[in-house]
Image (spheres, rainbow, N blue to C red):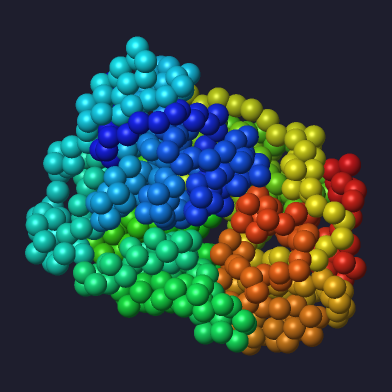
Amino acid sequence: MGSLFVPAEAEGPVLAFSEGLSFWGGVDPATGRVIDAHHPLCGQSLAGKVVMMPTSRGSCTGSGVLLELALNGHAPAALVFREAEDILTLGALIAGRMFGKPLAVVRLAPEDYDALAAAPSARILPDRIEAGALSVPLVPLDPTKLALSDADRAMLAGEEGKAVQLAMEIICTMAAGQGADRLADVTRGHIDGCIYASPANLRFAEAMVELGARVRIPTTMNAISVDFGNWRAQGVAPDFGQPAARLAQAYVDMGARPSFTCAPYLLPEAPSRGEAIAWAESNAVIYANSVLGARSVKHPDFLDLCIALTGRAPLSGVYVQENRAARRVIHVELPEGADDALWPMLGWMAGQLSPDRIPLLTGLEEAAPSEDDLKGLCAAFGTTSAAPMLHVAGVTPEAGEAVAADADSTRITRADLANVWQTFNQGDDRVDLVAFGSPHFSLAECRALAQALDGRVRNAETAVIVTLGQDVLARVREEGLLARLEAAGVQVVADLCWCSISEPVFPPEARVLMTNSGKYAHYAPGLCGRAVRFGSLRDCAEAAVSGQASAALPAWLA
């Protein structure tokens, strides 16, 4: 028996993935080809295939990528999952509900999933999925079983306008798919869909504006794809700059705050422990749950707006206390003398070891990570895991009560971390670009970079760019740090971040980039087609001055 999450008839060859895939940064939205350099099926085309994976992972923007594939004719014929999945499911739901481009989404029990994965092709019908002699009955979702409040029913009936009605229909469908029996109030939202991942994001947002959409809870916005006020002066081509700016403006027109940051936890009045919020952007969700102790499911793009329009979210996932427990314990062999490069490498490795469940990391009780260390940990974890949070024993607020009775265990050794360092350092020693700010740089990181540069000027052949939010930029300017960084040859850019940056802000001539971000080390080869070097913030500062990255392992890993 399987569940039909998004109904559509489909047929095609089966393409089964052994591990999840982030469509944002992992799939070319124009062609449907896998571009994640770290994925075992890199180079494969998804177009017209019955694509199977345990679940998706990575960025919430994957729903927008799938919508674009549906609109341009390069989408999979169907998606089949074994575990819970929201991001691609929502993209398929929007494609059918708003644009008449249905794309079947199915979830199967493990034994049926394994049997289908071995088949050469499959056919999905309204009541079953067939592959040769295999025939698995499919049961459609039934959103009518939700226990709704009178206010919910009024929104669902269209009493507050077409946009709110559509939003509530989508929320109820997603709630049924998540196994929720009711909805919950949320206090604030964060929109991820304002990144111009493809024309589909703009089509969705402007369609919602035309329907009269208006957010009803305080709602911030993710980094966008251009420096909103300066993209023309930066030489960005109008055929990209204009739609990217229009997309941002559409969300502003719907009442969202133009915060334009992928690190909303750096804004004043961060969420408090236990507060139910509705954030999209994977690193922000993981940080909010893990470090702040707030509560948010990793909402996919488009659902973030639906929740902001209604103030209601499915009561499921990590909104529920019992679902916040760790189901895997990862003991970390902490290398003596480790620097800040440890945390993004550790996050990436932890996600590899816990791709579908919340982990508890032990062995770090004496490490005393900073908020920025935890930011790097959470961001890198989100590239390799679908889980919306992690716990760090002795560090994060819920770690002491975090282990489920059926949790298993594994380890991360010094050798494992050395292998991650090698994975992140595939580029040549000569560095053309140093990329800081994925996620957006904090005030403390700007201070640390200015101190690491220590009055020196970057190498004439090596560009150095910091991306950050407007709120942090204002404080950096007030403190005099902006002048110090610019005197060193550092370019400071607001509003966009490395996962949304494009040429010519991204130096076209750069062939090898270096970053202190595990998130960007993972995504950069697919997003920008450049080779990558990775190191600590100080390592990156030294490369900025010398133009060279060290070929040797860090001393604490050697």
Q: In this view, does 292 lie above or below 53?
A: below
Front-lying residue, 216 or 479: 216
List x then y, in percent, for residue 487.
79, 85
> Residue 165 versus residue 350: which sits nearer the camera?
165
Q: Where is residue 334 in the image (x, y as percent from the top left)?
A: 75, 40
Q: Quadrant of residue 142?
A: top left
Q: In this view, does 398 lie above or below 283?
A: above
Q: Quadrant of residue 230?
A: bottom right
Name the residue located 29 percent from the left edge and 45 percent from the top edge: 102
Query: Which corner quadrant holds the N terminus?
Result: top left
Q: Residue 283 placed where, x, y %?
A: 53, 55
Does residue 321 appear left or right of residue 417 in this picture? Answer: left
- All told, the count of numbered labels is 0
In depth, the one of 481 and 3 nearer the eye is: 3
Quarter of the picture containing the C terminus is top right
Position of residue 255 relative to residue 277, above or below, is below
Left or right of 359, for residue 436? right
Residue at (46, 21) in percent of width and height? 120
User: Residue visible at 37% across and 54% down?
Assistant: 71
